[in-house]
Image (cartoon, rainbow, N blue to C red):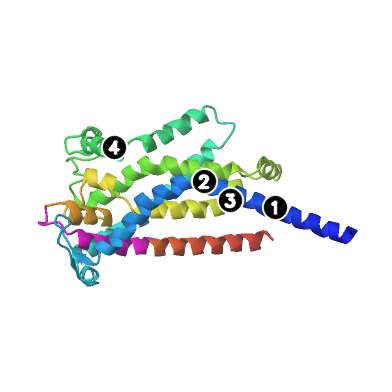
Amino acid sequence: MSKTSADTEIKAVTSKKKFHDKVVVNLWCWLFMAAAVIFYILFQGYPILCSIWYSLLDWSGLTTNATFIGLENYKELLSDQLFWNAFANSLKYTAMIVPLELVVSLLFAYILNNEKLKGRGIFRTIYFIPVIATASVVGIIMIFILGVQGPLNYLLNWLHITDTSINFLGTAKYAMPTLVAISLWKDCGTYMIYWLAGLQGVSSDVYEAAAIDGAGRGKTFFYIVLPLIAPTGGIIAILCAINSLKVFDIIKTMTEGGPFYATDVIATFVYRTAFSSEIGMPRLGYASAAAVFFGATVIVVGLILNMVRSRLGKMNQEVSQ
């Protein structure tokens, strides 16, 4: 056998071995992912497909009789004032809470990222504890605290800040801001952890160089650290916005969309339409149409935010170059 033939055979054997190893690795990867994929199909993919199909039906969900009506449910949504009120409230809630959560969680993360801060591990735990609490339990406790005869009104009256008790959850003017404040306290710890992960990716050499140049913590943060963690911030903003658009549990527990639908969001609208008897016979098909329509809206919002994040990331790279 010539040297050329031997080299060719060795290369062929090596190539086959690499291909075999690659196949084996891919099979192991899919094997480990199988459980997650199966659960996603069962509990996410299949329900989504069912919702799309149900949205094309005139069906209460309580009978075996369902009439196919095509896009009639979607046409009805276009003239449903309660749906558009819930749609607007969802966007309003998101617009109010996302900037607050981003700024407050970043502030806490930057403070707690300081290695010289004593007891920072304890403070991290304290700020994260509300995330662990169940939203329904938090809602019930907050209803008691914020009630007309609750501790908060008693404190405000005792300090002579107000002369009369404030109905925080029963007044349209205060209901939404109150829910935003409670959600901020409840969820801020999650985004604080995300910000901490981004901040800990910044090398200590950056801080040392800034200190040598005479930059204080404020200038170091705004002109050096913030541009470096901007890509992480974009991802956090997307997660925060999507989670805010899907809010349900805290609103359902505390106000159920009231007073006078002032805090009614898409999730409570869908729940009330599909499962509640307060409006008469449930309409699962119509509720599915509302859910699918708003789900498409959330996807569009996510894509737009991702495009903005990518654009800002490219601009940041161009500036750094």
Which residue is outermost to the right?
2
Whether residue 301 appears in this view of the structure is: yes
Which mark, residue 18?
1
Which mark, residue 311?
none
Which residue is outermost to the front?
1
Helix, strand or loop at mark 2:
helix
Q: Mark 2 points at which residue?
A: 31
Which one is in front, 71 or 92?
71
- Tell me the magenta residue range: 278-298
Which is in the foreground here, disc 4 or disc 1? 1
The disc, 4 or 3, on the residue closer to the chain's N-terminal end is 3
Say whether residue 228 is left or right of residue 252.
Answer: right
Quarter of the figure with the C terminus: bottom right
Q: Which amino acid does label 2 sit on?
A: Leu
In x, y percent, where is residue 11? Answer: 78, 57
Say whether residue 272 is left or right of residue 122.
Answer: left
Q: Mark 3 points at which residue?
A: 26
Kindly indicate the quadrant of the structure image that contains residue 59: bottom left
Which one is in front, 51 or 310?
51
- Label 1 environment density (alpha carbons within 10 Å; few <14, some 14–19, many ≥20): few
Which one is in front, 89 or 132?
132
